[in-house]
Amino acid sequence: MNLTESKYKTEVEAVDAFVEKFKLLRSEIARVIVGQDSVVEKTLISIFSQGHVLLVGVPGLAKTLLVNTIGEVLGLSYNRIQFTPDLMPSDIIGTEILDENRKFKFIHGPVFSNIILADEINRTPPKTQAALLEAMQEKSVTVAGHRYLLDLPFFVLATQNPIEQEGTYPLPEAQLDRFMFNLVLDYPSFDEEMEVVARTTSGASAMAKKVLNAEEINYFQQLVRKLPVAKNVMQYAVGLVSKTRKGTTTAHPWADKYLNWGAGPRASQYLIIGAKTHAAAHGKYSPDIEDVKAVALPILRHRIVRNYKAEAEGITVDQLIMELMK
């Protein structure tokens, strides 16, 4: 039993403590980040669900600041990797060099950190994008036949330019599927932008305080997974995913009409673990269908592929998912 486990007598008490910590995390982040409440909440849910996040948005929307701030409040180390067309896999995971004794020595790359900001991940070719795959899935990297474990917790927050911008490489489906959430960052409202400008041009800078440490995060990640799930909630989650699978007996009419490809089993897994974390963060001891719905959009958004008919009729991915949830 570690120090964090010994703090709480029961799991109910631990969930109550998690609610308070989650509120505190959000309020500390809000001292630095203006607005983006939904993005902040979903990013925190992903961390406690042991998932990864893909942030899609134009440059200049404080994506880097968000990761930096989350690293501070969680008391974790973080590295930023700027993805460029000439970036090599060894620039991410590290490389072996000959030391002064003429023996090979492994030099750790920037991926050996708790939080990784993969900035503009679609600016680099698939070979380099794939270097993150093993790290994201296995929490380890393999170099010259040797396996190196990464420090836990490990979380990748990748940013992506909208695909219509020039000089981008679409992420392979296998890599997209590794991300729990696909969050779309929008422009701030007029009042939010006024506050951003006032804060950033005055010389005063807000600082976020550390709220948790690595041991507590690992504990709460395991706690969330222990939450019981009612059978009808699991049926709803699996049923929602199966509705996206064109040509099957469970397919929704819109899936047959507008989709080329549906979501795989990982979507169902993420819906349940995401619903558990969402429920725990809001003081529930078991998730319900509303918790599944709360995380469904960013989980399914990058796992279904529209056909030409959907694009021609202007049916967006989000509209399709909302129709499936009715």
Image (cartoon, rainbow, N blue to C red):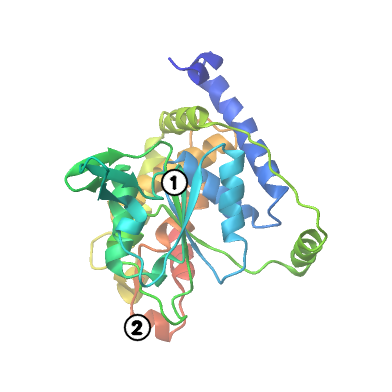
User: Is the N terminus in the top left, top right, bottom left or bottom right quadrant?
Assistant: top left
Tell which of 231 and 23 is nearer to you.
23
| Residue 229 in picture, x, y percent from top left | 41, 34
Give coordinates of residue 280: x percent, y percent: 54, 34
The circle drawn on residue 47 is none
Outermost residue on the bottom side: it is 312
Which SS class for mark 1?
strand
Asked if the residue under mark 1 is in contact with the one under mark 2, i.e. CB atoms within 8 Å, the reply is no
**Upstream in sequence: badge 2 or badge 1:** 1
Q: Residue at x 32, y 70 (%)?
A: 125
Going by the numbered disc 2, the residue's amino acid type is Tyr
Image spot of residue 111 (x, y percent): 39, 49
For the point 81% across and 57% down, the residue is 203
Q: Is residue 83 shown above or below 221?
A: below
193 lies left or right of 265:
right
Reading the image, the residue beneath label 1 is 155
Q: Amino acid at mark 1?
A: Phe
Q: Quadrant of residue 26?
A: top right
Q: Residues within 10 Å of mark 1 (few under 14, many from 20)?
A: many
313 or 188, which lies in front?
188
Q: Which residue is mark 2?
A: 308
Q: Gap in Å between the C-alphas at discs 2 and 1?
A: 35 Å
